[in-house]
Every structure is written in C-alpha cells, then in structure tokens.
Image (cartoon, grey):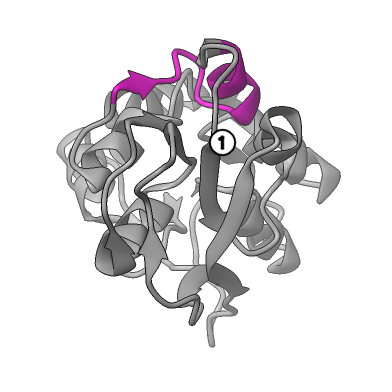
Amino acid sequence: MILTRPEGRNERLAERLRALGYDVVACPLIEFEPLPTGPIELDGYDWLVLTSATAAQELRRRAGGRPRHVAAIGEATASAWGGADLVAPVSTQEGLLQALPRPAGRVLFAAAEGARRLLADELGADFVALYRTKLLRPSEPPEGDLGVVASPSAARAFAELRLGVPVVSIGPQTTDAARAAGLIVAAEAESPALDAVVSAVVAAG
C-alpha cells in the first residue's frame, strides 16, 4: 500500500491501515509551497470559501478580520480553519456551490495557484492563491500493489512513476485526473474523510 500525501499527512491513514494488516509505504509525491500574497483582510466578506485544508491553514497565518460566514468543501478543511458555517454534503466545488445560499453576496475564494475557478466564476468571487503544489519524484520507486491518491496532482505524480499499480481515489475530481493520466482506479472513496478512504481501500481488496 503506497500513500502519496505530503510529508506529515499520511500518519493517521497509515495507522488505520496497518491495524487492518496492510503493509504501508509512505511516499509523498507532492509538497506545498506558500505564495507571498501578504496579509489578507476578511472583514467585509459575506462568505469565505475554502476548498482545501492547506488553504485554510495558510489563510489563518496571514488573515485579518473575519468574514460573516465560512464554507468548506469537507470536514478536514473546516477543522483546519477552526470550524465552518457550511460544509458541502458532496466534497467537490460543484457540491459546495450547490449548498451555498444565493445570492451569496461578497465572496472570497482562497485556494491553490491553478485551482479550478468554478466557484469563483459562478459566484463572482474574489480569488486569492495562497500556495502552489509541486510534484515530487522519489529517488527509488516505491513498492506496493495499491496506491492511494488524494488530489489530482498526486494522481498525475503517481502516474509518472509508471508502476502499473491501481489506485484508490478520494473523490471524483481525483478519479478523473487519475484516469486521464492512465491509472486504473480500483475504488473511489465516498468522501475524503478518513473512514471513507479506509473503506475504499478495503473495497479495493
């Protein structure tokens, strides 16, 4: 079992899988590089929209003021911010967009450089890029018969290793990226939550 999340983010999943008898190898294939966007003032925004835990963490470091409401794409992202008024029932930008009230008012969308702009375009939101994702290549290819990819970037990085190993994806956007990169998706988690990912790994065999 090959886990590909960034350094320091594989431990909880690895612990659960090892308890189930899996041989786990942590092989981070992406890392996050903060962008120098400077202080960000949140006062005056009706909604702050967050689509990753990394964005939430980066914004907490440099934000001033507070928005009226916070919307998060999933529970992990909400927790990284310290709670949210709205968590998407389906952990995609489409799911979050559908859950937001209309009109949403003045919205700030904080995410990665190069993130999909669906939310920003549909809501007329201000967009701020807080970090960029860099692909990593290990010095030695990892060994395993199943991989877990938790983002489109990780899926592309895994495909570049040409291991011929199927993967478990944490959601539909990651699944699409994995298949586009030529990977076989053995299972897709119902959500990015830890229990859902573990269940998907078990289902994949």
Q: Is residue 118 above or below residue 37?
A: above
Residue 124 x %, y %: 70, 36
Element class at badge 1: strand
Most distant residue in the bottom direction: 139
- Tell me which corner region of the image, top left, top right, bottom left or bottom right, holds residue 47: top left
Is residue 184 in the magenta section?
Answer: no
Most distant residue in the front direction: 44
Residues rendered magenta in the picture: 85-98
Residue 146 visible in the picture: no
Q: Is residue 200 above or below residue 60?
A: above
Is residue 86 in the magenta section?
Answer: yes
- Tell me which corner region of the image, top left, top right, bottom left or bottom right, holds residue 135: bottom right
Q: Determine the residue positioned at 42% across, 49% down.
A: 1
Q: Nearer the viewer, residue 173 or 108?
A: 108
Residue 189 visible in the picture: yes
* In this picture, residue 117 sits left or right of residue 28: right
Which amino acid, mark 1? Ser
- Tell me which corner region of the image, top left, top right, bottom left or bottom right, holds residue 85: top left
* In this picture, residue 82 sits left or right of residue 13: left
Q: Determine the residue positioned at 70% across, 60% down.
A: 114
Q: Which residue is mark 1?
A: 169
